[in-house]
Amino acid sequence: MAQSDSAVIRVRGLTMGFDDLVLMRDLDFDVRRGEIFVILGGSGSGKSTLLKHMIGLYRPLAGHIWVADNDIAAAEGPAREALLRRMGVMYQMGALFGSMTLRENVRLPLEVHTRLPRVAMDAIAHARLQLVGLGPYAEFMPSEISGGMQKRAAIARAMALDPEVLFLDEPSAGLDPITSAELDRLIRRLARSLHMTIVIVSHELASIFAIADRVIMLDKETQGIVAEGDPATLRDTSEHPWVRRFLRPGDPEAECEEASV
């Protein structure tokens, strides 16, 4: 596992929700530098909402999120912009601009956040597309490529500014098993070759077991984290019935444990 024990993200006492609706209370966890960290949970548990708190889109009801020792909710002005540049985000459906080529999509963050000359921005955009295997498709429109390729292009755009942490929201959603497995291999290769920290929201078990170094599991009933660790170890050893049922769907033993609670 190519990671250190140092935490690049620290979450302490996080309570998140909207107005009087509380989704999660008193969350405490770290994301270690260089690991692939996956956020799990059932529908409506707040997985994507937690990710949006971690990238500064939502403010906590209580608690703190430190990214590289900076409180993301408290950062303002140039300090906040500098912090956000250290993070790359791929949203659930890719969110590519349909009127732009892949090269133009990947170049966009450079246009917004840097003053590099156009030739340099194009070179960086092409290099990022090459990293995800889309170099020959730089002048294609999003509508001209497959869903899996669109996800790859969105990852390339998220890496445009060479982020310290890459956030991926449901990267395998809507993909067939073969394409999903190819995307898993790409994510793991990028993490290892670039020594990048990657935070992923997912419910795709095959992907989770293939790429995750560590997971946390959110439970909307208890409004907290019910498990944390290596997903295979949790699957095989956890005594929590909901965790075992989630990680072992269709297992009669896990089903019986859940029914007996």
Image: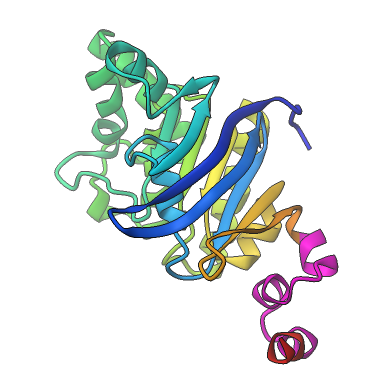
Q: Position of residue 250 (x, y in %)?
A: 68, 86
Query: Exactly how many numbered labels are in the figure?
Result: 0
What residue lies at 52% left-to-right and 62% top-to-bottom?
223
Task: Assess whether residue 56 is covered by the magenta stretch.
Answer: no
- Provide the residue span drawn in magenta: 232-255
- Identify the residue at the far left of this view: 99
Q: In the drawing, does residue 18 fall left or right of residue 159? A: left
Residue 261 visible within the image: yes
Q: Quadrant for the N terminus, please.
A: top right
Depth check: 44 or 181 in front? Answer: 44
Question: Does residue 96 lie above or below 116 as drawn?
Answer: below
Q: Position of residue 204 (x, y in %)?
A: 56, 65
Question: Does residue 155 lie above or below 75 as drawn?
Answer: below
Residue 132 visible within the image: no
Task: Assess whether residue 253 is covered by the magenta stretch.
Answer: yes
Q: Quadrant for the C terminus, please.
A: bottom right
Secondary structure mostly seen in the magenta stretch: helix
Q: Position of residue 6 (x, y in %)?
A: 71, 25
- Identify the residue at the far right of this view: 237
Q: Position of residue 214 (x, y in %)?
A: 70, 48
Question: Does residue 87 lie above or below 229 as drawn?
Answer: above
Q: How is the image coloured?
A: rainbow
Q: Quadrant of residue 128?
A: top left
Depth check: 105 or 162 in front? Answer: 162
Depth check: 1 or 60 in front? Answer: 60
Q: Quadrant of residue 140?
A: top left
What residue lies at 44% left-to-right and 63% top-to-bottom?
173
What residue lies at 57% left-to-right and 66% top-to-bottom?
222
Depth check: 226 or 235 in front? Answer: 226
